[in-house]
Every structure is written in structure tokens, then in C-alpha cells.
Amino acid sequence: MVGKSLVAAMMLVACLASSVRGATLDIDVPDPVLSGDTFQIAIRPSQRPLSDVTVLLRSSNEAIVNIQTLTVTLPANSTAQVIAYASALGAGNPDLKFTMGGADPAFRGDLSLGISIVKNKPLSIVITVIGWIYFVAWSISFYPQVYENFRRKSVVGLNFDFLAYNITGFLCYSAFNIGLFWVTSIQDLYFADHPDGVNPVQANDVFFAIHAVVLTLVTIVQCFIYDRGEQRVSWISRIILIGAWLFAFISFWIAFKGIISWLTYLYYFSYIKLGITLIKYVPQAFMNFRRKSTVGWSIGNVLLDFTGGALSILQMFLLAYNSDDWSSIFGDPTKFGLGLFSVVFDVLFIIQHYCLYRHNREDPASYMYSPYPLNGDSQDRSRLLTPDL
């Protein structure tokens, strides 16, 4: 959910570079590289080699990167830096490959470094700024609902199914992020599957997930201490959530027995999160429709979530354009589709609040047992606020 591209904040500092730190070589390349430029590749041994080391350079995509210095030699008993040169022929995200050879057995094998070549460097800065804006928007989007509940001393109008889905989804998201960010054995499994890859989970992802769990728990506590009418979690949601957690616990036992890896187990958590995201907004939208009101459902939360979602999608397109890599969007339709799905529901909530039910802004405290129109008859007002869906 939260923007992986925050790592690109390094682009704001001109002297920073992409780098790889291997057991034997440290390699640095400017990040990003501008298409059409010739750039330097700085290579330095991390320890003194016993003899001269030959390093062969090549590109994973010669149509994008032309290696001008095909071979460099690192002198024996020295950690001096050696410079190679390459030309960026077009935008993209190619890998630079380095093959070592020599008498010293410590300096043998291959290394790989992914680089970013862009069409426009100022656009890279714009992309970074957009990433920070939507990260902040998503992070603070939980607070308006907490404040709304506190101000009204009531959670009438906030759907409990939505909260139940939300806490489950963010717990799964936290488990996935924490495992891949902090657990070394799981990281080793990931890099065994993706030897040239980078960890997809960054510190900001972990912060966002834990922060989301805490704020969702605060909102749930409010449901116990503030006026909630006759609201409850519907049976359909209970069955879905019980099924999700049973799947998680059974998968844990299978992983514990060694039938699947712990990395695969974490992927299962991510699948639960994806499924939750697809359905979590439906109960709240349906309840707003039945009540013909959005009172109790914070529009501030919706506007901030819409801001974050819209900017994240905009950033995906800008990144794809700047790096000429449209597969980053359409090659992962699930990620793009889920982001778009959330924005569509935000638009629905905005229409409900500002267009369809804009005249029904009266606090429904006196109708706290009704999910139906605030101007409905007395029979409607005697019904439960949140019927089982």
C-alpha cells in the first residue's frame, strides 16, 4: 500500500549513487543515470587481493547500456578504486554484471547491480516528492476517524465489519513486512529466489504497517467505550475472518513441519491482505446506502486515502514513463488493480457524502439503531444499525 519509491528520496541528493557491497567488491554508480549520458562505474576491492584481479563488465540489456570499459584490473595488495565507463543509450532498469577472475580464490564469481536510467532527472525529483506526499497522506488518514469518534463520543455510523477486516488485513501486512525486513533467515530465502533482486520491504513499509495496526486498535477500543447502538460484526464477516485465520494457523503448522518455507508462509499473509482489501469497503458503503447518510464515517479519512491512492497511481505512471518500463504497471495487474479498486471506493464515498446524502448531515445519535434513512418512518428506526449482511 505504501510507496516503495520512498527509497528514491536519494535522488534529491546529487552525489548519492546506486551501490552493491559484496564480500570482495564495492561498486558504485550514479543514481539515477540520465539517458544519453556517459557515466562512471567505480570498482574497489573490499580487501587486498593476493594477486591481480580481472573484472569483466557486461550489461543485461545492451540496447540500453553500452559498456565502454569491458575489462578492468584491480592491482594486487591494494584497495585502490578503479573507474570504468558506460553509456546510457535509453531509459530502463538494466543490470550491470561483473565477473571476477584471478589467482586469488576470494575474488572469483559474479556480482550484479541494478541501475536506473531515466529520461528526465527533474521528473525523478517530482516522483520522489509525490512519494513522500502520499506516504504522509496514508499515514495520517487514520486520525480523522479517531477524532470523529472522540468528538461525537459515538461510533454509530462506522461499520464494524470494516474495522474487523482492517485489523486483520494490517496484522497480515505487518507480519509480512516485519518478517522480510528483520528476519535474516527469511531474507536469505528471498534472495535465494531472487539473487539479483533487492528487498521489496523498506523501513517506511514496516512503520506504516505497525502504525496502521495501532491506530486501528485505538478505533476498536473506541467502539467499546463510546456509544455504538446495536452494531456488531455480521455473521458473513465472522465466517470470512475465521476462515482467513484458520488458513493462517494451518499454514503456520505446515511451515513449522517444514512442508513449506517460512517465506512462502509470509506470502500467504500477503494473499490474505490482498483478499481483505478487495472486500473491506463493501460493508461501509452498503451501510451508508441503507442509512442514506455518511454521518459517523469520517470524510477526512476518505479524502486522505483518496489523495494517497491517486498520487500512488500517478507515481506509478510517471515512473513507468521516466524509466520506459510500462511492465512495472501492466506486468503486475494485481498491485495496480488493488490500488485502483481502493480509489474507486473512495470516489463512491465522496459521492455519497457530498452528493447523494449531503442533506442528511444530522448526527444520527437519536437514530442509533437504524442503518436506514434518517428521515425514515418509526418502523425503520427500530431496526438494527448494522444488519447481518
Image (cartoon, helix red, strand yellow):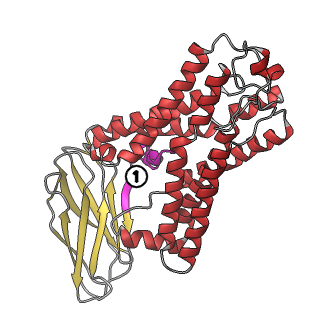
Relative to 204, say whether 307 is above or below: above
Q: Amino acid at mark 1?
A: Leu
Q: Nearer the viewer, residue 339 or 208?
A: 339
Q: Quadrant of the C terminus?
A: top right
Does 10 appear in magenta? yes
- Residue 130 visible in the picture: no
- The residue under the point 59% across, 48% down is 208
Relative to 123, say whether 380 is above or below: above
Residue 126 image point, x, y percent: 40, 34
- Residue 170 visible in the picture: yes
Q: What kind of element bears circle 1?
A: loop
Residue 142 image point, x, y percent: 66, 37
Relative to 384, say whether 20 is above or below: below
Looking at this view, name the residue that lies furthest to the front: 379
Does 92 appear in magenta? no
Where is mark 1, residue-wise?
16
| Image quarter of residue 112 | bottom left
Q: Residues within 10 Å of mark 1 (few under 14, many from 20)?
A: some
What count of labels does the image hold? 1
Q: Nearer the viewer, residue 205 or 72?
A: 205
Looking at this view, name the residue that lies furthest to the top: 359
Relative to 76, say whether 366 is above or below: above
Span highlighted in magenta in the image: 1-19
- The residue under the point 25% across, 62% down is 96
| Image quarter of residue 72 | bottom left
